Image: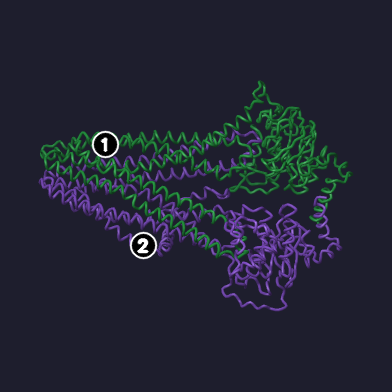
Amino acid sequence: MPESTYDPEAEEQLGRAFDRRLGARLMRAARPHRRIITGSMLLFPLIAVAELAQPWLLKVAIDDHILKSDWLGLTWVAGLYIGVLAILYALRTLEEYLMQLTGQRVIHDLRAAIFDHLLRLEARFFDRNPVGRLMTRVLHDVEAVSEALTSGLFAVVADVITLTAVVAVMLWIDWRLALVTFSIVPILVLVAVYFRLNARDAYREVRRRLARLNGFLQESLQGMPVIQLFVRERHERERFGRLNTDYRRALFGSMRWEASLYATVEALGSIALALLIWYGSERIVAESLTFGGLVAFIQYTNRFFLPIRDLGAKYTVMQWAMASSERIFGLLDRAPAIVSPPAPGPRPARSGSPAVELDAVWFAYDADDWVLRDCSFSVAPGERVAIVGATGEGKTTCARVLNRSYDVRQGRVLVDGVDVRDWELASLRRHVGIIFQDSVLFAGTVEENLRLGADGAVSPLELARALETARAGFVADLPKGLGELLGERGANVSHGQRQLLAIARALVYNPAVLILDEAMSSVDPESEALIRQAMTGLLAGRTSITIAHRLSTVHAADRILVLHRGQVQEEGTHADLLRRGGLYARLYELQTGAAPA
Amino acid sequence: MKRAIDALQTDPASAPVGHYVALIALFAIVNGVARLGSRFAITGGCQRIESDLRDDLYAALQTFPPRFYAAHSTGDLMARATSDITAVRSLLGFGTISLVSTVFAFVGVLAAMLAVDPWLTLWALAPYPVLVILARRFNLKVNERAQAAQDQLSVLSERVQEYLSGMAVVRAYTLEPRARADFGRANGEYLRLSLALARTEAGFSPLMGLIAGIGTLVVLWAGGRAVVDSRLSLGALVAFNGYLAYLTWPTIALGWTLSIVRRGLTSMTRIQEIVVAGSMSTALTEGGLREARPGSDTPVLPVATGRGGSAASDPATTNSPAAPQIRFSHLTFAYGDRAPALRDVSFEVGPGETVAVVGPTGSGKSTLGLLLARLWEPPVGTLFVDGRDVTEIPLASLRAGLGYVPQDGFLFSRSIAENIALGRDDGGAAQVRAAAGVAGIAEEVERFPAGFDAVVGERGLTLSGGQRQRVTLARALTGAPPALVLDDAFASVDAAKEEEILINLRRVVSGRTVLLMTHRLRAACTADRIVVLDAGRVVETGSHEELLRRGGLYARLWRIQQLEEEIARA
């Protein structure tokens, strides 16, 4: 499990075996594949016929040929038997493949749908749902859904067809004998239901205890230093041992029911067989049944019991599947809160309106824990503004409301004089680019990472220029240059180099308004100098907002806003603010003082 | 069954069919009971082995130092403790049952068949070698393709993880189309590979039916001829068919069983790696050469005598054992092959003295505490408690004498009382309450509906960072250890609360040896002595006033903190 934060017990809830609403949704999910499904449904009767032909041929062979010493005829029947076998094999292979095909396609489509949906959900959703939980939806829950289709729908239809055919043939051969066999069915069903219900409860207990055991283990792994510091090893070991024993007991309990069920069903089957022979012999004596008929009958009986025995197992599978589908559809039903307006208004490039403006904005991540309180400021086109302030004063939040990662509670955010809520989302984010300096690089080549999100063709020349401006000359020294593969999170370039690549990427992306969320990262002094040069190149002649954690980088800004308690408290140039001797001056002293002497 | 049918055939009227019928039913019941018994015995045994294995693994995990946890992700270790152990259980349980029953089935059925008719047996078994080879080939192919599909699933999962954890970037750069395409490619590739697997498997599973069918066919044809020639009775023919059916499943299952055995063995190796490494690390830390001397099991740090005493004893008044002296002597230490975190550090904390270690982030403060508690092993001859090298002191007695408050307030998802009493064996309610009082958390806890029984964690109470820190402080105080190590214990506590805790603490810690690592100078300024660390070196030592007068790093840090307070008040 990649994530520690999801609740294992909540993931183990059993659903109802069938829910009409969910069933309908599942059907809808399967609809694009209805041709394959219909195709395989058509195979079922054929398979049933081919399966049931085998005992029948056996009966014919015994009654008409073996007992009549007709060897030639027997060879003919044997040939026919081979034919039936070959056909059955082909049909079954096809059936199995079609079933997998449907299942896998449904999985594929659902995964794509869920991932696509996740991409459209807003930041707040991701704040509340750990990545690990979402990955479970995309990767594992979908498999349960496909299982519901194959083990549930398909298998039930196939079983019903087979059962009907078997019952019909048995009644046709000798209805009295058939009724004797069926007499055991009510007992069988009762036993199956009784054991299965108990097994299900036991199994649920197993899951619960396993979740508890694993939860304890995971916590121990994370808190091992604490356990060691307080010399709690023996104590914790005993605790673990108890949970472990609990789990083993539960496991044994569930196994007991399961094994008993199978043993009982098998014993019942044998008893049915004994009944058959007993009653069948009377019928043979009465000359109303042939030997071959009895032998065939015995084989039919076996095929009759098989689906009934597996009924319980399928029930459990359906329960899991329903619980999973419930979670998946719950996720898919969650409408994205931040979307483009139905009809994005034409963007009037109102001349004279500021490039970016916050107008009396109130914002809180939770309840009434206000981060921005009545915050207002604007940035003129071409202006370079820096936002400074102590940590937790809402600097980064300003950037987040500007590209509509979050919507404000009150007030307005305007870009080019138009409320961001009236912008088409993608074009807003193309227009206002947030650049995280300590940025995520994705698995792929250097070039792919530079071209991220940039629309249209970027000429090699432009790429080269961006790299040059970003001082990312090291790319040329990589063994494969731009074609060099970057590992997950850009693992094979240094921290400083990653920042340079992120700056180059921003240059390629080339948004009209650039917001630079400057990370407080510790890089070696040499790279820091390089990065500073690169940033100067990046900001030259561009509307920009730098969210500065280090005041040393804001001297060059046209205007500095000091954010405090969710509002702009001071603003002006570096020199103005220093002269004023207010908050900024103190922040400045703080930081220059903190730098090593 | 054979007898019954033969009897029917020869003399339908007087056949003692009822007799045979009773026998069949009896055998069915005996078979069922025997099978159930063996199932219970084998599975029960396997589950016990599994359970023991998990206990061993857990015990091994407890012996590893933080270095081990830095090198192994929690996910990897969890995988070993869950899926690997399950694989071993399958090996022992299903693997054993299946292997044993396959052998028995073959031996038993062959004997029965040979007894009925040797020639027919030969005929019936003729297709088997071919089928076994065929099944093997299929099996290899299925395994190969299953592996490919599994690998692609990991790729897919990496993609999802990558994009979902980088959602902020995805949004800001409008990367959705790219993410969709990228995911779509991996998803499509997985579909392709799993369908390739499905094609092979689709041919594989109906093989079972085919084998059963061919067996029946051969018996029907060759056996039928024997019946026609009167070399065989009809009952024998039918019985033969039944026997053959018994062979089908074990034959098919053989390939499957072998793959389970293979997987189980691999997993067993992975588990053994940890368990063996665990016993080695125990040998190193507990039983090493330097500790092999007699008498080393007597605790060096005197253990608090008041621990077993009256439950009402207040940690402040508990009769603490003599406070130890701690001495760092030319200590240079590096984590692995990184640059040294501490360089030539020497200073001493006298018995009952409070020494504060201050310095910027990354100056090596926390390392001092980690080495003292031997969570990381210090070099020999650099760190002494009461004049004795810590590497010679048994871990348990060393740690039992230390009240340690680590930097991250890790709490277990148990009740607050349990978390606090984690400190010592008999943390009675009164002790817990008293410790919580000193740590300045008691009143807040009592305001929770469940009080000290409130459960901390995801499914319980969410504590703030400051509350967590104070609970960990209370945890360190229970049992009145003679030495306290506070590693940035007040970082998430506001200034007023800190003041309160400090007043309480000063009362409690009098007479104890305290090593206080902090970046909050307010907490440090009342210490007997302050050691200033910078980049792993001791740059200044002295009392608060002395250091301020000197105007060095400490004085500068002091000024910075005053500014921060001013800004916060602004």
Respond whether the residues carrying marks 2 and 1 are from the same subunit.
no
Q: Amino acid at mark 1?
A: Val
Quadrant assignment for the C terminus of chain B: bottom right
Question: Label 2 lies in what chain?
Answer: A
Q: Which residue is most to the right?
A: B549
Figure check: A544 above or below A74: below
Coordinates of residue B393 in the picture (x, y in percent): 68, 28
Q: How far from the left and from the top, in percent, is residue A549?
A: 74, 58
Q: Which mark is residue B443?
A: none
Disc 1 target residue? B109
Measuring 21% from the left and 33% from the top, which residue is drawn there?
Answer: B115
Against B479, residue A37 (above or below) is below
Amino acid of disc 2: Ile
Give percent across and percent down for residue B177: 55, 65
Can the viewer see residue A382 in this picture? yes
Q: CA distance from mark 2 to mark 1?
A: 42 Å
Residue A124 at least partly seen: no
Badge 1 crowding class, 10 Å Cα cut-off, few under 14, some 14 to 19, many 20 or more, is: many
Chain B colour in the picture: green
Q: Position of residue B10 (x, y in %)?
A: 11, 38
Disc 1 secondary structure class:
helix
Q: Residue at x 59, y 75 (%)?
A: A344
User: How dense is the environment of label 2, judged by Cα within 10 Å: few (below 14), some, or many (20 and up)?
Assistant: some
Element type at mark 2: helix
In the image, the chain rendered in purple is: A
Q: Which mark is residue A36?
A: 2
Residue B378: quadrant of the picture:
top right
